[in-house]
Image (spheres, rainbow, N blue to C red):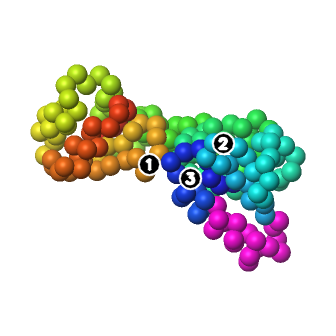
């Protein structure tokens, strides 16, 4: 399964294409592989033909989930597959949802005795001043680099905040999102 309605579409196509090539190549004598593609609008296809996601439950023994980002890693597609009793690779829907939420993951790790970097969740919609000014003021409290990424979005949206570089201001001016900066 590859593609998906998110910003990781192209990455997922490449990952799924590699898996498909291996299954149809060196492993063709062991497995019969089908290309399950979810397009950018969320429509499902099997080997290029439109398909109903609910029909998949009766056609396959197991699905190799090569979806990236939201929909593929956040528990959504896992819930669909679980609801129809379809076996799939990767984490179940709950673990996927927790894993995609950085703040929730951090809390789970800490509650289970794992050390995590210093972090703070910030709801950027509550920032009253200009984003550029806020970024400058906030960075003054941290003498080293900051890692920040949206709490529940694709990892490709993450960015490294280092000093007061122009790129940092450009990224800080983007629409509000919940972020966790780490030292």
Compared to 138, does 72 lie above or below? below
Name the element at disc 1: helix
Q: Which residue is mark 2?
A: 42
The kind of secondary structure element at disc 3 is: helix
Mark 3 or 1: the one toward you: 3
Bounds of the magenta span?
A: 16-32
Front-lying residue, 28 or 14? 14
- Can residue 87 be seen in this snapshot? no
From this viewpoint, which residue is outermost toward the right?
A: 58
23 part of magenta stretch: yes
Q: Which residue is mark 1?
A: 155
Give the image location of residue 71, x and y in percent: 59, 42
Does 113 appear above or below 17? Answer: above
Q: Residue at x 56, y 52 (%)?
A: 9
> Which badge, 3 or 1, is on the more N-terminal residue?
3
Report helix, strand or loop for mark 2.
Answer: loop
Q: CA distance from mark 2 to mark 3?
A: 11 Å
In percent of the image, x 65 and y 55: which residue is there?
2
Where residue 153 appears, x then y in whole percent?
A: 46, 40
Q: Residue 123: x and y, percent?
A: 33, 27
Based on the displayed image, in which of its 4 quarters is residue 19 positioned? bottom right
């Amino acid at each position: 399964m590859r593609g998906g309605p998110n910003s990781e579409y192209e990455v997922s196509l490449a990952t799924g294409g590699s898996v498909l090539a291996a299954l149809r190549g060196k492993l063709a004598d062991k497995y019969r592989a089908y290309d399950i593609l979810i397009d950018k609008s969320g429509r499902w296809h099997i080997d290029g033909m439109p398909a109903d996601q609910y029909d998949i439950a009766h056609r396959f023994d197991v699905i190799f989930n090569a979806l990236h980002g939201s929909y593929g890693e956040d528990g959504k597609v896992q819930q669909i597959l679980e609801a129809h009793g379809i076996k799939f690779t990767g984490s179940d829907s709950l673990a996927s949802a927790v894993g995609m939420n950085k703040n929730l993951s951090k809390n789970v790790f800490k509650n289970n005795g794992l050390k995590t970097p210093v972090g703070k969740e910030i709801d950027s919609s509550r920032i009253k001043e200009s984003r550029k000014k806020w970024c400058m003021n906030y960075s003054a409290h941290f003498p080293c680099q900051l890692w920040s990424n949206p709490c529940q979005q694709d990892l490709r949206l993450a960015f490294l905040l280092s000093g007061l570089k122009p790129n940092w201001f450009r990224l800080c001016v983007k629409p509000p999102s919940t972020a966790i900066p780490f030292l």
